[in-house]
Amino acid sequence: MVDIATTQVMQFHSGAVDDGVLQLTQLDGREHISKPYEFRLELASTKADIDFAEMIKKPAWIGIKQGVQLAGSNTRAATTLKIHGVIESFEQVGKELEQVKYRAVLVPTLDRLRLATQSRIFQKKKIPDLVKQICDDHDVEVDTSKLSGSFDEREYIVQYEESDLDFIHRWMEHEGIYYYFVQSEDHEKVVLGNKPEGYGDMQSNEKFSYKPRNTDGSQTEAQDSEAATDDWFKEEVVFDLGCSVKMLPKEVILNDYNWRDPQTGLDCKATISNDGKGIVYEYNDHYQTKAQGDKLANIRAEAISATEKIFTGKSDSRGFRAGLKFQLKDHYRNDFNAEYLLVSVRHRASQAIALGSGAASGASYSNEFTAIPKAKSYHPPCDTPWPSIKGVMHGKIDGGDSSTPYGQIDSKGRYKVKLPLDRGDAQDGDASKYVRKS
């Protein structure tokens, strides 16, 4: 019997079935910084009654083999790059001869935060801590060690009729925090960052050569022969790279209002491009001090500046992942030989499987990517909608002391009001902040 772990260049594993029951024949994967990845899988099996419910419940991973250069030698060895997650959907398609066809969509565990839609209130939280708390509730590991600088504590944060994923997305977008995924041997991890120092590293520090493809566009091939391993695991290269540049606005201007200090102006500016034209103006970005406004203005300016020069390319590197950086060499245009941040990657791969033996043949892999210069500071665009409360909402005065039936009022004539949307069980005034009268 053929050992599929050594003959197949792509593997699929699920806790719902034994290894080898489902053979991966094709994948189409999409990754983008600050978005959950999605891999659409074509699978084949001789088993016609795979349990759908178990496939959805159990964790899964796909493995793609990659050649690596052994240190101090000319020999290349094989390693398996894993992409972990859960099965978002599983479909039985039909049968061809003895092969039963299935389809599955693999997503990170983080993606399941979109299934929880709720309203609640958080108090005295920094955004990275809030993101980690919510992800912890869903058993998603978050690494905040690559964040730079400090984050202000927010006294009152409302999640309103939105999914947990949208909630953390909009706040990370607001604060200029990006995220990407790092894969370990047994699970994936979400890494937060906000500066170029937080970009991820490839497993290998090798520079990637620029080597254009043949005119027929042929890709990495592994044929059904002893030479298949050598062919699949040969040096990975970038075989196409282009660049587009666009005009940018000149500066960002923000403004806000702080009722506690209405005389202090909160207009803040940050330069996007000295050669730019026009301005970007935003009002009510939820900041209270000039320092907070200056920080936000710089984040907005950096986010726009990072879109000035976009590189698009194609490669056969199985290790390309959104959020990681790589270095290019041997390009015919010398200033393209630089370091880049991968913003998005689309993977396509296939292999033919002989189900009787499990042997693979005719395998191919390639990807398309977008990237920006590594020196640029990437921040996710503020695309996630902010919810709004339409009309009047009833509330209850939160007395602040369970021993008395009377509501407590502060020196400014404000009551604490508990809103019905809040599902928390905090008592004695801890469920609310003082609310100004309209």
Image (cartoon, rainbow, N blue to C red):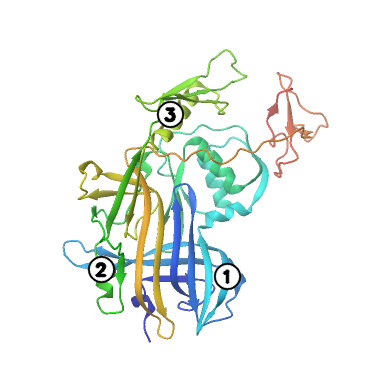
- CA distance separating discs 3 and 1: 47 Å
Query: Quick check: 138 above or below 68?
Result: above
Contact (Cβ within 8 Å) of mark 2 with mark 1: no
- Within 10 Å of disc 2 (Cα), the crowding (few <14, some 14-19, many 20+) is few
- Within 10 Å of disc 1 (Cα), the crowding (few <14, some 14-19, many 20+) is few
The dot on residue 77 is 2
Q: Circle 1 is placed at which residue position?
A: 91
Q: Is mark 2 on a helix, strand or loop?
A: strand
Name the front one of labels 2 and 1: 1
- Within 10 Å of disc 3 (Cα), the crowding (few <14, some 14-19, many 20+) is many
- Whichever of callouts 2 and 1 sits on the residue coming sooner in the sequence is 2
Residue found 45% across the figure and 46% down from its top: 179
Query: Quick check: 302 above or below 164?
Result: above
Residue found 69% across the figure and 27% down from its top: 434
| Left or right for 243, reference 191 | left
Q: Residue 39: horizontal and vertical position, in percent?
A: 47, 61
Q: Which of the 4 image quarters holds residue 436? A: top right
Q: Which of the 4 image quarters holds residue 153? A: top right
Residue found 38% across the figure and 26% down from its top: 276
The answer to whether residue 130 of the structure is visible from this angle is: no
- Whichever of callouts 3 and 2 sits on the residue coming sooner in the sequence is 2
Q: Which amino acid does label 2 sit on?
A: Ala
Q: Which of the 4 image quarters holds residue 303? A: top left
Q: Which amino acid does label 3 sit on?
A: Asn
- CA distance separating discs 3 and 2: 45 Å
Q: Which residue lies furthest to the right in this view?
A: 405
